[in-house]
Amino acid sequence: MHTPAFTQRSELMRALWSLRREFLVVGLFSLVANLLMLVPTVYMLQVYDRVMSSGSELTLLAVSLLCLFLLGVMATAEWFRSRVLVRVGVQIDQALSTRVFNAGFDAYLVQTSASPARIFSDLVQLRQFLTGQGVYAFFDAPWVPVYILLLFLMHPVLGWTAIALACTQAFVGWFGHRHTLAPSEASMKAQAEAQSYLGSKLTHAEVVESMGMTDSLRRQWANRHREAMENNDVAQAHVHRMAAISRFLRYVQQSMGLGVGAVLVINGEITTGAMIASNVLIGRAIQPIDQVVSTWRAIAGVRQAFLRIERLLEQFPQRDAALS
């Protein structure tokens, strides 16, 4: 099988490419889960437009049992998806932990500017991201056009409303990422430098104390720590401001979607069931974008961890032959 050129970029990329079958399985389970997420919408349409008009309790029972069964299948698909991602995280750790240890050890011996100890937390961060909520957004995002298409089938106004709301949410996410990434990276860098500085000095704690340099060491660490806290305060202010804006938009979107549907019901262009169902579909269309916005900091952090692991493994490849 032909190996894509991008996998030659680094050893880490090759390790991820070796798990492509597992990611494909996750994609298939995401396909099932997202298809069945339409079940509540269809159920609402049936209840409001068919059961309520006919008054048939038997129809309600049949539709409810079918809905319950399909929702059970959806929950099972999501559970299997999470289990596969946990397995992916474990396999990533097993494939790279020894390499990361050897590279970190070599980096410590040659006293590079990088923090060897931090690389282990980077690997943990990468593994945890693969099993967290942030990665689900990337598998759910391709279904946004499907939900929007269904809204267009209900009424073009509903489709354009969903597009406008999704674009607004995406713009807010992009704007927040652009204006908070630099302060967050500066904060993480300053904190890492303060911890690395203190850790390197504490290695020779007896010598430092015997030479009476403890006070000087504490002052230098305090300056670094204060700089890290100031950068963290700036980053947190940006993050909280963007989180407040995003939360405000989320509430506005819910109300606006229902309001647009209500106008169409008043004009006799859609039914009440379609109004309720369209509001759910609008929420589903925006949810992956909202997930990316809410987890952007974790995404930025894991990106930096990914790049640090790549650089370290590229800098110290000499143990590869010994390991194989």
Image: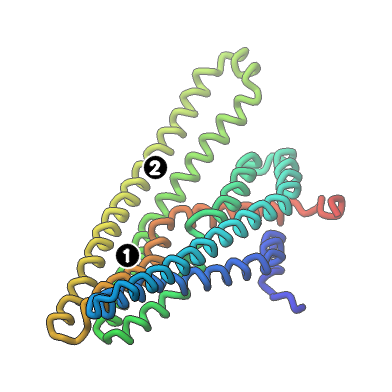
Which mark is in front, 2 or 1?
1
Q: Position of residue 287 (x, y in %)?
A: 38, 65
Quarter of the rendering occupied by the C terminus = bottom right
Q: Which residue is mark 2?
A: 232
Question: Observer-nearest residue: 190 or 215?
Answer: 190
Determine which quarter of the picture holds residue 39.
bottom left
Q: Residue at x 58, y 60 (%)?
A: 80
Viewer-closest of 279 and 293: 279
Q: Position of residue 126 (x, y in %)?
A: 59, 52
Q: Quadrant of the N terminus?
A: bottom right
Q: Residues within 10 Å of mark 1 (few under 14, many from 20)?
A: some
Furthest residue in direction left, as rendered: 266
Q: Residue beneath label 1, please?
A: 172
Which amino acid lies under the numbered mark 2 shown in the image of this protein?
Answer: Asn
**Disc 2, SS:** helix
Residue 263 image point, x, y percent: 15, 79
The amino acid pointed to by label 1 is Val
User: Label 2, label 1: how many angstroms apart (C-alpha)?
Assistant: 22 Å
At 50% from the left edge and 21% from the top edge, which residue is drawn? 216
Is 101 above or below relative to 250? above
Question: Helix, strand or loop at disc 1?
Answer: helix
In this picture the colour scheme is rainbow
Say whether disc 2 or disc 1 marks the residue closer to the N-terminus: 1
Is residue 276 toward the left or the right of residue 197 in the image? left
- Pinpoint residue 321: horizontal percent, then vertical percent: 86, 54
